Image (tube, rainbow, N blue to C red):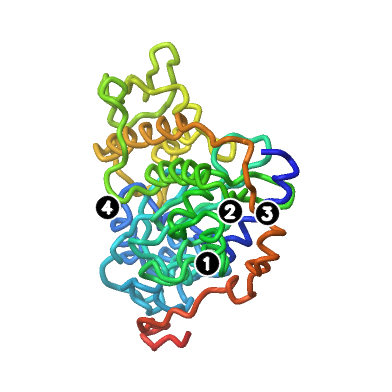
Amino acid sequence: MQSVTRDQAPLLADLMPWSVAPPRLGRGWPTAPDPASLKARWDALLKAQGPDREALFEPTRSRTLHTAVGRLPGQSSGTERLVRASGPCPEPVRALLAPFDEQWLIPDHRLIDAARPELWRVADEQQVFVVETAATPDATGPLLLATARLPLLRPGRIRPLYRRPGATEPNLAPGLRAHLAARLGHEPAPLDVLAWILATTRHSPAGRRVPLTADPELWARGVDLGGRVLRLMRPAGDRPKLPGGRRPYVRAPLPARPVTLDYDPEEEALLLDEGRISPVPAQAWDYTVDGVRVLEQWFTARTATPEPGTLTAIRPTTWPQTWTSELLELITVLALLAELPPLDDEFKSPITTADLRNADVLPVPDTTRRPASVLDAHEEGPEGQLALI
């Protein structure tokens, strides 16, 4: 893409105007790679009394055992102060804790410093959360991630595809799809616009820019490429698989508690101590986000030594089989993503920021940068009171 075109392309922040800062947990123990550990941590917290419970909780300025907060939208946790809480652990939910690393979270507002309830209100099976990575101009890896899980990654902003549950009211500049329809000859669905964004977003000094095109053939190729990215990052069903001869398998059993992770480029093998998985393409091993190898980050999250006596220290004593399955799937996803060819760097028939201004698509109304009013269900406030929102 020519530099002048890059400068003229609209900003992602204008095309998907509503964004939310990432949630801030404030403590690590309410998340884990397995749900059983979270329930055991909750039981240990409630079994402790007085100063012991407070120390285990790890209080911050935003959350202590005495903090009064309402229930997270769509969840069923208690709302009494934790200093006198009782009962079973709220059922853990899946969350994206790091790039391509789905873990589990106790969905309890009392445990999370900044939970961003506006994200929870629009989270459902049809939602797609777009997460901005912290990539610099010379960094490798994607500028955007897409996930169906609640994102807990920092520091990038989160842009939901839909402003309301049920895939209603797309978080797209008003009039954008109608303008694209006039230029392309058909109105793209919100998921198609997202696919194009995933395939084409570029870094610029002013922020992430999305080069648009009025060329139907180029648009179709971009949507196809972005759709493949989306199916790998946020599968609606089974993720695509590598061809038979290239699928990774466990060639030597993984140890009960692996300590080291290494890569043998000649054998295309991932080494977990004496355990061995192959074939693992070098592109999968080298796949990075924000300068960090995804596979190494994923492994460290499951093997780093926690501080003794903390709730985080409650974890599986041996490597679960489910982690092996997740690792094999992660290798496959990274290998397939690394194989995707980039879209042409020269964009024909560009739709520029000036074009969108002339069509009154930009600037977007200020209201589109704020959450929509979602009042479909009552939300319980602190101590069981009805929340007013």
Q: What residue did someone put label 4 on? A: 36
Mark number for residue 352?
3
* Mark 1–mark 4 distance (CA, rounded to whole Å): 24 Å
Identify residue type, mark 2: Gly
Closer to the camera: disc 2 or disc 1? 2
Closer to the camera: disc 3 or disc 1? 3
Tell which circle, 2 or 4, labels the residue nearer the N-terminal end: 4
Closer to the camera: disc 3 or disc 4? 3
Identify residue type, mark 4: Ala
In terms of secondary structure, where does tag 3 sit? loop
* Mark 2–mark 4 distance (CA, rounded to whole Å): 29 Å
Residue at (43% x, 11% y) in the render = 266
**Where is residue 13 shown, x and y percent of the image?**
62, 59
Q: What residue did someone put label 1 on? A: 114
* Mark 3 neighbour class, 10 Å CA radius: few under 14, some 14 to 19, many 20 or more: some
Tell which circle, 2 or 1, labels the residue nearer the N-terminal end: 1
Q: What residue did someone put label 2 on? A: 156
